[in-house]
Image: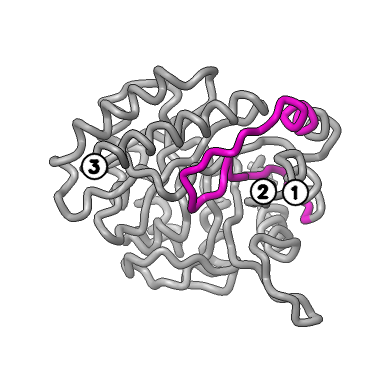
């Protein structure tokens, strides 16, 4: 089978170290967490003892790579000085937490130009990214996530992300590829020819060596629908065949795939609570059925 790591986004409610237990409960091989509440500017102050406990439990666990996802409010293309300042602070905080717990990096929604176009914001965004990486301690990666293209969001086209990486020119600045966003953004990843073309464009605009991590999400939105709506693995327009095709592509060998799916309701009618054992098992079955290259 390919050397692919299957992980999931899990809650760190009650203490950042709680994420390790929750990851193990769904048999995740990697985890992603928020550094703070994703819809709030207030930064969580993770106490030294909580960070130490995270590191201790992580070392004793079956969990491998750890990633953080920055809060949703940040927009590095903001035309408001206060919003931009808060955004910078949020990303620096996330990278600082990543460094403190020994995480691989932070995934970032770069922001939106709100229809002004990439040319209008590229200078500000690239300068802001440089500032963030200069201020943030350690070597944690900052991975810019591709988008479905809604609302002027930066990163629907690989060329936009490639432009930023070239301007900043830092080994710490890389890319997170979200499979739902990729399909909704217009890249056909449901068949071999489409995956080959998609990853060829990614390599030309960004470079496969800059593919740091993936979000493995099926899509409720059709190809090119430009709506960010995640679906459980095999239940959407990417489908099982799409994930089989992607996981068989050499670009994905050795990568970490993190689930951000809605999850399935329990048999007793309990509410779905995000990535769960069934979704992890579905991706693992696809991976484990692949021939060794």
Name the residue: 57% across, 57% down. 260
Is residue 141 placed above or below 283 in the rendered structure? above
- Find disc 3 in the rendering and name its residue: 80
Farthest right residue in view: 60
- Find disc 1 in the rendering and name its residue: 23
Q: Is residue 291 visible?
A: no
Q: Nearer the viewer, residue 224 or 190?
A: 224
Q: CA distance from mark 2 to mark 3?
A: 36 Å
Q: CA distance from mark 2 to mark 1?
A: 8 Å
Name the residue: 36% across, 67% down. 227
Q: Tell me the element at label 1.
A: helix
Magenta region: 26-55
Residue 284 coordinates in the image, percent (x, y): 71, 55
Q: Residues within 10 Å of mark 2 (few under 14, many from 20)?
A: many
Residue 189 coordinates in the image, percent (x, y): 43, 59
Q: Nearer the viewer, residue 118 or 89?
A: 89
| Helix, strand or loop: magenta stretch | loop
Q: Are marks 2 and 3 in contact (CB under 8 Å)?
A: no
- Find disc 2 in the rendering and name its residue: 7
Name the residue: 28% across, 49% down. 112
The mark closer to the camera, 1 or 3, is: 3
The mark closer to the camera, 2 or 3, is: 3
Q: Earlier in the sequence, mark 2 or mark 1?
A: 2
Q: Which mark is residue 84?
A: none
Is residue 273 placed above or below 246 in the rendered structure? below
Q: Is residue 101 visible?
A: yes
Q: Earlier in the sequence, mark 2 or mark 3?
A: 2
Q: Is residue 34 magenta?
A: yes
* Quarter of the image where one finds residue 205: top left
Q: Residues within 10 Å of mark 1 (few under 14, many from 20)?
A: many
Q: Are marks 2 and 1 in contact (CB under 8 Å)?
A: yes
């Amino acid at each position: 089978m390919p050397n692919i790591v299957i992980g999931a986004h899990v809650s760190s409610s009650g203490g950042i170290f709680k994420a390790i237990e929750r990851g193990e409960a769904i048999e995740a091989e990697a985890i992603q967490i928020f550094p703070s509440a994703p819809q709030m500017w207030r930064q969580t102050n993770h106490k030294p003892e909580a960070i130490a406990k995270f590191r201790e439990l992580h070392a004793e666990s079956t969990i491998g790579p750890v990633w953080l996802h920055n809060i949703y409010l940040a927009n590095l293309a903001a035309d408001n000085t206060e919003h931009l300042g808060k955004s910078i602070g949020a990303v620096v905080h996330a990278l600082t937490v990543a460094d403190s717990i020994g995480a691989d990096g932070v995934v970032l929604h770069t922001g939106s130009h709100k229809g002004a176009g990439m040319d209008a914001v590229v200078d500000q965004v690239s300068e802001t990214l440089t500032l963030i990486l200069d201020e943030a301690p350690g070597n944690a990666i900052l991975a810019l996530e591709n988008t479905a293209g809604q609302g002027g969001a930066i990163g629907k086209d690989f060329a936009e992300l490639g432009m930023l990486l070239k301007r900043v020119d830092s080994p710490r600045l890389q890319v997170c590829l979200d499979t739902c966003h990729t399909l909704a953004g217009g890249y056909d990843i449901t068949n071999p020819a489409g995956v080959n073309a998609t990853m060829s464009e990614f390599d030309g605009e960004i470079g496969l060596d800059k593919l740091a991590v993936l979000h493995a999400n099926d899509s409720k939105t059709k190809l090119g629908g430009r709506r960010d709506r995640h679906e459980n693995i095999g239940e959407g327009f990417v489908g099982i065949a799409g994930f089989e095709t992607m996981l068989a592509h050499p670009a994905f060998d050795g990568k970490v795939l993190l689930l951000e799916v809605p999850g399935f309701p329990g048999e007793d009618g309990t509410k779905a609570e995000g990535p769960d054992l069934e979704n992890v098992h579905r991706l693992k079955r696809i991976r484990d059925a692949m021939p060794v290259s």
